[in-house]
Image (cartoon, grey):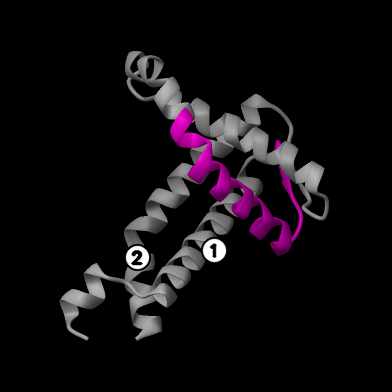
Amino acid sequence: MSQWQRTNHPTQMQRVLELMIRWLLLAFAVWVAAELVSGIHLAGWRSSLGVALILGLLNLYLRPALVLLALPLTILTLGFFLVVINALLLLLASWLASEIGGINFHVDGFGAALLGAIVISLVSFVMGRFVKPRDIAQNLAG
């Protein structure tokens, strides 16, 4: 397989590996937020992985609609409202985690969710500069 084919046409295995790496990075970002923000409570690595799964699904399915609906407000606030959307999704993830059971995650309120969303975004941004999930997946899958 040529270099062009590997880079532009990832195999199914590469896609799965990339998704798993992104999931682990989000779990790490959630853990960091729970360590730094006193209003975010997280117990155990399984809970961290569970919250990352919930947040990943919310970001995949719900966030695009919220961003589109809030576009005028986002423009007026010069993008700050995106942080508010992320905070609301973090609160929703907290509620969903409590409903699912087995995931020990709780956000005390909007202030903690806002700080947590900022921390998660910053950690994800920094990690994204150093860790390239697609490249790692290609190397692991061969």
Amino acid at dot 2: Lys
Q: In the rendered image, is residue 114 in sight?
A: no
Q: Residues within 10 Å of mark 2 (few under 14, many from 20)?
A: few
Amino acid at dot 1: Leu
Total labels drawn: 2
Q: Residue at x 37, y 57 (%)?
A: 128
x then y, percent, for residue 29: 54, 52
x then y, percent, for residue 135: 32, 72
Disc 2 element: loop
Q: In the rendered image, is residue 136 in sight?
A: yes
Note whether 141 is above or below 119 in the view shown: below
Q: Using the numbered discs, state the Cα–Cα distance from disc 2 to disc 1 in whole angstroms.
A: 12 Å
Disc 1 element: helix
Residue 24, which numbered label?
1
x then y, percent, for residue 138: 34, 77
Which of the image's four quarters has the C terminus?
Answer: bottom left
Residue corresponding to mark 2: 132
In the rendered structure, which segment of residues is drawn in magenta? 38-65
Is residue 46 rendered magenta in the image? yes
Q: Main secondary structure of the magenta part?
A: helix
